[in-house]
Every structure is written in structure tokens, then in C-alpha cells.
Image: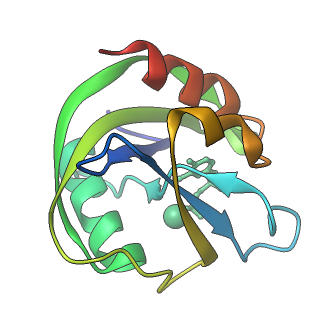
Amino acid sequence: MNDRIVVGAALYDDEGRLLAARRSAPPELAGGWELPGGKVEPGERCEDALVRELREELGVEAVPLERVPGQWPLPKGYALRVWKARLVSGEPEPLEDHDALRWLTPDEVWSVDWLAADVPAVSAALAVP
Ligand code: 9L3
Ligand code: MG
């Protein structure tokens, strides 16, 4: 079912800025920016995986909102699916797999070096009102 799915969050703050996270691992992805998230575990719902990943990686509580239409291929047969998400509590911190976070204004969204799969995913997220 949700086999080989990676979920990512298009997490916005109250000012409409989008959160970008810079990966610190693995070495081949380090320095690339992504929508935070990770692999869905066996039997887990995608939205539950997203909540869990944001808790683990950023130390925040968030709620998934609408799914961003589409999915984007990743290495090893994985696919990236994205949900818009709202922060409920906490201030994001790079606790796991990231070494920097940035809240990007609409003008700044393309100023970071997104991972390949995240480029179309971010475009699609921006197209969701
Ligand atoms: N990945 C790409 N873009 C993203 C995310 C959350 C993940 N927005 C890729 C990086 C890894 C794989 O998916 O190759 C698994 O991600 P993780 O579980 O290491 O975060
Ligand atoms: Mg992750």
C-alpha cells in the first residue's frame, strides 16, 4: 500500500513563509534543501508518517492539510508525496538529518539549492492556493 512512499511537508508560518531544511546526511544529499519528512513505515498512514517525521526531525507538532497533487520519483523506487501542513506548536529545530532551517518568503523560495525531487514538488506546492 504505502510501500516506498516518502512524505514531505510544505509547512507554512503565519506570514506565509515556507520552511526549507538543509540535509546533513547521507553524504550524497548533504547540503541540499528539502521539504522536511521521510519514509512511511509499513502499515502507517501517510499523514501519520508526516506528523511523526516532523516531530522527530523538527521537534514540532503539525497538522497535515491538503495533499499537493502529484508525486515525484526518488532513487530506489521511492516516490515523494507532499502535504501542505500547519504548525500547531513548537519552533522548528534541526534535530535529525538537517543542519539548517530557513523560512522562505515567496521571493526567496528559489534561492536555496533544493534536492532534485523537491524542485517540482515545491513548484506544485506553491500552485496550491
Ligand atoms: N527525500 C527527498 N525529498 C524530501 C524528503 C523528505 C526525502 N523532501 C529523499 C531523501 C532520501 C529519501 O527521500 O533519499 C528518504 O528520506 P529520509 O527518510 O532520509 O528523510
Ligand atoms: Mg527525513
Residue 69's place in the image compared with 105, above or below, is: above
- How has the structure been colored for display? rainbow
Position of residue 102 in the picture relative to residue 85 (left or right): right
Question: Which of the two residues, 104 or 56, is positioned nearer the viewer here?
Answer: 104
What residue is at 32 percent from the left and 33 percent from the top? 1
Question: Which of the two residues, 61 or 77, is positioned nearer the viewer here?
Answer: 61
Residue 97's place in the image compared with 21, above or below, is: below
Residue 27 visible in the picture: yes
Residue 28's place in the image compared with 63, above or below, is: below
Q: Quadrant of the C terminus?
A: top left
Residue 45 visible in the picture: no
Position of residue 74 in the picture relative to residue 13 (left or right): right
Indicate the quadrant where residue 118 lies. top right
Indicate the quadrant where residue 76 lies. top right
What residue is at 46 percent from the left and 22 percent from the top? 126
Residue 60's place in the image compared with 77, above or below, is: below
